[in-house]
Image (cartoon, grey):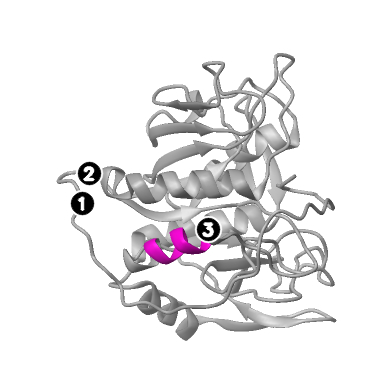
């Protein structure tokens, strides 16, 4: 089972990978199609984001999409009933955090959480992320996807990533499309979430308002940058709520990246490294990025 805000489950379902560097490959995109962010997450209340959602997809391995099947594309595919369930409400919070940083962002929403007839969310796995990311690779040009935001994952004793995920991230990297992921919220003595533990992704930890690494933010392993972690987000019923975590910190970088990306992932990453600041807590050290909104 994958985790969104709080999780301490371990399921062995992926493999260890290494690092490969690539020359960026620039692909043509459809004329007049705005740059978009592919968000792989739970469902959302799509009625809240009508001006920003440009396409919806549902790909689930357990329970069903709104059409009663395990695959759906088009209007309503990513929609879920209004709920306070942490899993089902997570995607709405992530989209809200993106739009606070980039109000005009265009979103391709990919839902990977099925729902049963009682409205309960299914368990989901790294294979579900693999399936969604493969869809992104196949449809990246069509929807002009410029960034992939995956604000979820799970902790394992070692970094475990599937060969499918590895191949797809490498393909996207050639196209100058980063995959941005959270470090996770299990505590700084825990490994970084998979898939964010893999060096080909850009993994994000969390700092508080005074620039200290949050004690809940995973930090044992690869964390590329730490970002602000607190946002007032829109909930599924349209009300506002304060939330924090590496998920919304990840969302803020995805929002920034689509507005400020340079000619390659390496160039944009190097720019962020040039403006980073040292940050720490009693246990770990890292670098903090204060994004200009």
Q: Main secondary structure of the magenta part?
A: helix
Q: Please tell me whether residue 288 belongs to the stretch shown in magenta.
A: no
- The reply, left or right, for residue 136 in relation to residue 245 is left
Q: Is residue 28 above or below residue 70?
A: below
Measured as percent of width and height from the top left, residue 190 is found at: 82, 68
Residue at x 63%, y 45% (from the top left corner):
232
N-terminal of the pair, mark 2 or mark 3, is 2
Q: Which residues are magenta?
A: 165-171
User: Which numbered mark, 2 or 1, is in the foreground of this view?
Assistant: 1
Q: Are marks 3 and 1 in contact (CB under 8 Å)?
A: no
- The reply, left or right, for residue 243 in relation to residue 137 is right
Q: Please tell me whether residue 170 belongs to the stretch shown in magenta.
A: yes
Q: Is residue 109 above or below residue 146?
A: above
Measured as percent of width and height from the top left, residue 217 is found at: 75, 65
SS label for mark 1:
loop
User: Which numbered mark, 3 or 1, is in the foreground of this view?
Assistant: 3
- The reply, left or right, for residue 234 in relation to residue 116 is left
- Residue 293 visible in the current orientation: no
User: Foreground: 220 or 194?
Assistant: 194
SS label for mark 3:
helix
Crowding at dot 1, Cα within 10 Å, few <14 / some 14-19 / many 20+, comes out as some
Q: Which mark is residue 165?
A: 3
Q: Which residue is mark 1?
A: 29
Q: Is residue 68 above or below residue 73?
A: above
Q: CA distance from mark 3 to mark 1?
A: 23 Å
Q: Are marks 2 and 1 in contact (CB under 8 Å)?
A: yes
Q: Which mark is residue 33?
A: 2
């Amino acid at each position: 089972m994958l985790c969104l805000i709080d999780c301490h489950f371990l399921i062995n379902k992926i493999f260890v990978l290494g690092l490969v560097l690539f020359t960026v490959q620039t692909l043509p995109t459809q004329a007049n199609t705005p740059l978009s962010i592919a968000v792989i997450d739970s469902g959302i209340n799509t009625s809240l984001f009508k001006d920003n959602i440009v396409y919806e997809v549902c790909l689930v391995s357990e329970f069903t999409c709104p059409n009663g099947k395990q695959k759906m594309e088009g209007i309503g595919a990513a929609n879920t009933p209004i709920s306070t369930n942490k899993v089902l409400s997570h995607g709405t919070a992530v989209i809200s955090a993106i739009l606070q940083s980039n109000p005009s962002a265009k979103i391709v929403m990919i839902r990977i959480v099925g729902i049963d007839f009682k409205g309960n969310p299914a368990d989901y796995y790294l294979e579900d992320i693999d399936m969604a990311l493969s869809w992104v690779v196949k449809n990246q040009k069509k929807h002009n996807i410029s960034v992939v935001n995956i604000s979820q994952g799970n902790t394992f004793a070692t970094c475990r990533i599937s060969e499918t995920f590895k191949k797809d991230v490498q393909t996207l990297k050639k196209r100058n499309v980063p995959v941005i992921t959270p470090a996770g919220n299990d505590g700084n003595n825990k490994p970084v979430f998979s898939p964010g533990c893999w060096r080909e992704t850009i993994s994000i930890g969390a700092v508080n308002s005074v620039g200290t690494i949050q004690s809940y933010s995973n930090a044992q392993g690869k964390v590329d940058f730490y970002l602000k972690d607190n946002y007032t987000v829109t909930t599924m019923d349209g009300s506002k709520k304060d939330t924090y975590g590496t998920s919304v910190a990840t969302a803020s970088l995805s929002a920034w990246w689509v507005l400020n990306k340079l000619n390659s992932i390496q160039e944009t990453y190097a720019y962020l490294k040039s403006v980073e600041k040292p940050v720490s807590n009693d246990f770990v050290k890292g670098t903090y990025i204060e994004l200009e909104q």
